[in-house]
Amino acid sequence: MSKPTRALVLFSGGQDSTTCLAYALTQYDHVETIGFNYGQRHEVEMACRIEVLNALRAQFPAWAARLGEDHCLDLNLLGQISDTALTRQKQIEFDAKQIPSTFVPARNLLFFTFAAALAYRRQLTCLVGGMCETDYSGYPDCRDNTLKSLQVTLSLGMDSPIVIDTPLMWLDKAATWGWAQHLGGQAFIELIRLKTHTCYLGDHETLHDWGYGCGTCPACELRKQGYVTYMKLPQSV
Ligand code: ZN
């Protein structure tokens, strides 16, 4: 198979998927985005997606030229089969395997499978996602082997080769900030800081150096620690 030129980015409006989107816009000729609405307790995430897309289009003309349609799928049915802190008003806890209650079982497998079905229809042959084993919060469906296996399954199941590209897989959060700087300079760092959303609790009111969030949930902790480490690196200034 030849190198894919048309990609679909799994785009949530968070730091990781926004960095992946910038990467895709430097790597592929035509890039579309897909988001999933599944009754997140942080509805703010869905609003941030649009804000990030608008800001990217306005501030980065070369990327805007490659950025195509945004798709949003309604996966509210996930609420019927999971009982988690992301889809219901309940405290985030950790189980015996240190998996947080924000985990929706096999969520990424479902997301990629729906994305692949849409990609097939849109003639997009690469799926880009921000999954990461380094800071993966114990989610087994973020593992590199899980996604490599899914790539094979989807390619066989649709009888059409599809590549799953996960550029953040081996980066930690500080390296992800550094890579964002490399991709889009300080303007892109500011866009991530002010427009993206990561907080599990949906706090988009409290602004810190590293962006908006409650500052104490596991997602904010990761983002904050990554930013603090990144700012100590020589290339970040
Ligand atoms: Zn938070």
Image: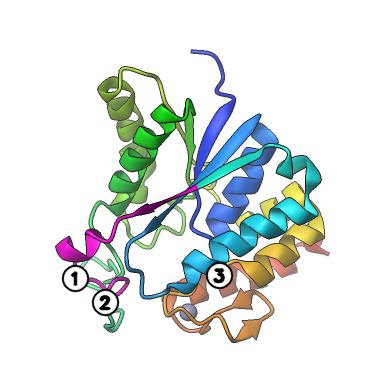
Tell me the residue at 60%/47% (across/down): 21
Examine the structure image and report whether residue 180 is included in the region drawn in magenta: no
The span picked out in magenta is 71-88
What secondary structure is marked by label 2?
Answer: loop
Q: Of the residues under marks 3 and 2, which one precedes in the sequence?
A: 2
Q: Around disc 3, counting alpha carbons within 10 Å, would you say few (fewer than 14), some (14 to 19), or many (20 or more)?
A: many
Asked whether the residues under the numbered discs 3 and 2 touch, taking CB atoms below 8 Å apart as contact, a structural biologist would say no
The amino acid type of the residue labelled 1 equals Asp
Position of residue 37 measured from the top left corner of the image (x, y, whole percent)? 37, 60
Residue 223, numbered label = 3
- Residue 53 occupies quadrant: bottom right
- Residue 87 occupies quadrant: bottom left
- Residue 3 occupies quadrant: top right
Q: CA distance from mark 1 to mark 3?
A: 25 Å
Q: Of the residues under marks 1 and 3, which one precedes in the sequence?
A: 1
Position of residue 83 measured from the top left corner of the image (x, y, whole percent)? 19, 70
Asked whether the residues under the numbered discs 2 and 1 touch, taking CB atoms below 8 Å apart as contact, a structural biologist would say yes
